[in-house]
Amino acid sequence: LEVRIVSNAVESVPGGITAPRGFLAAGVAAAIKTPGRPDVALLVSDRPATVAGTFTTNRVQAAPVMLCRRHLAGGCARAVVINSGCANACTGPDGMRDAEQTAAWLAELLDIPVGEAFVCSTGTIGTALPMQRLEAGMREAATALASDGGEAAARAIMTTDTRPKSLAVQVRIGDRDIRVGGMAKGAGMIDPHMATMLAFLTTDAAVGGSVLQACLADVVDRSFNRISVDGDQSTNDTVLMLANGAAGGGELTEEHPDWLLFKGAVLEVATALALAIVEDGEGATKRVTVMVVEAASERDADRVARAVAGSLLVKTAWFGGDPNWGRVIAAVGYARAAVEQERIAIDFDGLPVVRGGCRVTACALEDLEAVYRKPTFTVRIALGAGNASAVIHTCDISTDYVTINADYMT
Amino acid sequence: LEVRIVSNAVESVPGGITAPRGFLAAGVAAAIKTPGRPDVALLVSDRPATVAGTFTTNRVQAAPVMLCRRHLAGGCARAVVINSGCANACTGPDGMRDAEQTAAWLAELLDIPVGEAFVCSTGTIGTALPMQRLEAGMREAATALASDGGEAAARAIMTTDTRPKSLAVQVRIGDRDIRVGGMAKGAGMIDPHMATMLAFLTTDAAVGGSVLQACLADVVDRSFNRISVDGDQSTNDTVLMLANGAAGGGELTEEHPDWLLFKGAVLEVATALALAIVEDGEGATKRVTVMVVEAASERDADRVARAVAGSLLVKTAWFGGDPNWGRVIAAVGYARAAVEQERIAIDFDGLPVVRGGCRVTACALEDLEAVYRKPTFTVRIALGAGNASAVIHTCDISTDYVTINADYMT
């Protein structure tokens, strides 16, 4: 993945989640998904790490989400096992026992306290984990653990993703090079309200638990919570961040002169992963940024951005390159925000199409069509009602999205 | 259209909106849409009729919607002209002048007060009405007006609809046979919150203005407001109802012993039209009723029903006949309602699939697949949280939906 480097102090480095020192990872095939495709990933810190997490706000939550919430209270993580191909959601007490058994196996394998072993699952809802195959996969992954295993792990957490999503950055803080790595998976059921499907961030900085949690919550709110593929919120959304202090140096706090530099590096990694999820949305052919400005409140700006980014008619027009701006303004109108039709202005990649709620007569539809045919563009909606703004990153909905999801289980 | 006759007192009759006595209609081709396809409809009462209307709650409203709201204040209607192929929305002051000019032409053609002439438009947003062609079409339609013109009018208001939606019923009230007719059009941008795309109801009963308005508002809330095709609310949604008293007999009021019989007949017609819109939803291959029971409040029941009916993942699974019940329970979970996972029970056409938030182990996925392959079925979701309930009628989302909407304008 490429990173939009916003600060000269931040530079891209290879290695993904294992770029930060002291982290090992692996990805193996355990026949939980299609046989032969990697489906079990391990992430291990060679020393205790502080851990922060954000989770789905769906009222229906998978067993591994409940287990992670519980272990998070301990504040310390040594290892995470992630399987794709089975979400272990809506599996009742049996599913909870399976998640606990998985954590117990992980603790035993690595000789760590069970409360420092985390478990994540993604895949089909309502089927039981194939425990024997999972255990065999975990044993194989434990022997394959490597300090360059980040990419293999990123491949093993994929479901309908067409490519792995993995990256890392380095930033100079005091006399130390601090690294932040990350990996994520999409690609459907993506409409996070507090977290996204599955994403993992690592750093070799030393950061205290509550500071790390506050940092992660804010970063997630500005990255993973600003994307939507299909408006469907998952039962398994989880973002975990581990900080193991392997870079040496003192503990980072919000009072540190370079704190914002560190947090900026985390935000860079999270934003790049979030955009990668949208770009690799199921069946997506283009990524679109919906930016709402001049709203009366942040809530209004957010509602309008989400209404436009979530409109099936808008997203299918993007797919077809059909310059149907009327669908965008219709979605603005039904977003339940303070909107005056006569004040609405809409630009597509700088092309003024709507002013005063009407089409700019000098604007040729061919020009809008040219924007709609780009792989990435921005829709800027000005409401003329105030100073608040919001951004949502989304993708189009194609015939392939329907085909993929018409035939997922069978 | 077939009517589900719920009362023996109500019988189906032919003729659509012209079944009630004293109504004339016509539909002609005026080259506003594809040349040769009918696109201008006229509905005329041979005597003054009381009129009621409900309109889109979208903050972006088409010029004809604003004109109808204004004329509705007068309480009396003699004629409605409806064009398809151009929504006259987001057209600014010019569009408002075009709508007013259309009403003026209609008044002149029929020698009626301009305040009793109503104008409705449906089609592409943001393009100007071709006024010359519209005027020519209106003149032709005026000469074609006939007491059996209901079906022709129903054809002229279609856009992406694949079939006209028109029906009528008769009910004995006192010593009179009262008739209620209706027509409607879909088929995309259907997620009415106060009204639907375009629907017209007629009756030859005599009903006062405020009584008719209250009756229509309640009927619309229980019919057109309970459907969704794609979650996109239109800028042009309008339901108009005309009551001309041509059946003779005294004025019907809410105190009349047969009032509920009359209102039931109106509800029958509106419900049949609403279901027909869903069945003919863009690209739809099946109609699904989502019924939520045992909710803590009506708002909760409504939220859960709309979340499930609006989920792109649920709708694409229905299309593919993929027995992915996990997507249904995931949508229940993110509906922002008081939901306890362990209490959720879900049945598909009487097949118990989920109990206590988990899959019923005795239920074979093949049985669910068989339900998903039916042209119509019901999803019943019990929340175990109270006594409130709600119903939403919806359809699947197919590859054809995407294809239709990827290439609408161009």
Image: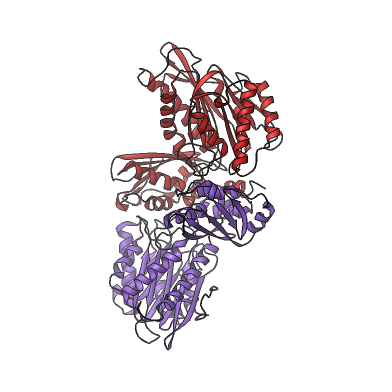
Chain colours: A purple, B red
User: Is residue B222 among the parts visible in the rendering?
Assistant: yes
Q: Image check: B390 left or right of A184?
A: left
Up the image or down, A90 lies above or below A11; here it is above
Which of these two is toward me, B405 or B200? B200
Residue A100, image x, y percentages: 31, 67
Q: Quadrant of the N terminus of chain A?
A: bottom right
Residue A84 visible in image: no
Residue most toward the top?
Answer: B175
Q: Where is residue A405 in the image (x, y as percent from the top left)?
A: 51, 54
Dividing the picture into quadrants, the one containing residue A71 is bottom left
Q: Which of A254 and A226 is in front in this view?
A: A254
Q: Position of residue B47 (x, y in %)?
A: 54, 17
Residue at horizontal 41 percent and vertical 57 percent from the top: A125
List the single residue furthest toward the bottom: A175
Residue drawn at 33 percent across, 64 percent down: A98
Q: Could you tell me residue A80's position as x and y percent?
A: 38, 73
Indicate left or right for B201 with B158 as reference.
left
- Which of the two residues, A217 or B104, is positioned nearer the viewer here? B104
* On screen, residue A87 above or below B391: below
Query: How many numbered marks, from 0 up?
Result: 0
Observer-nearest of B138 and A102: B138
A160 w.r.t. B23: above or below: below
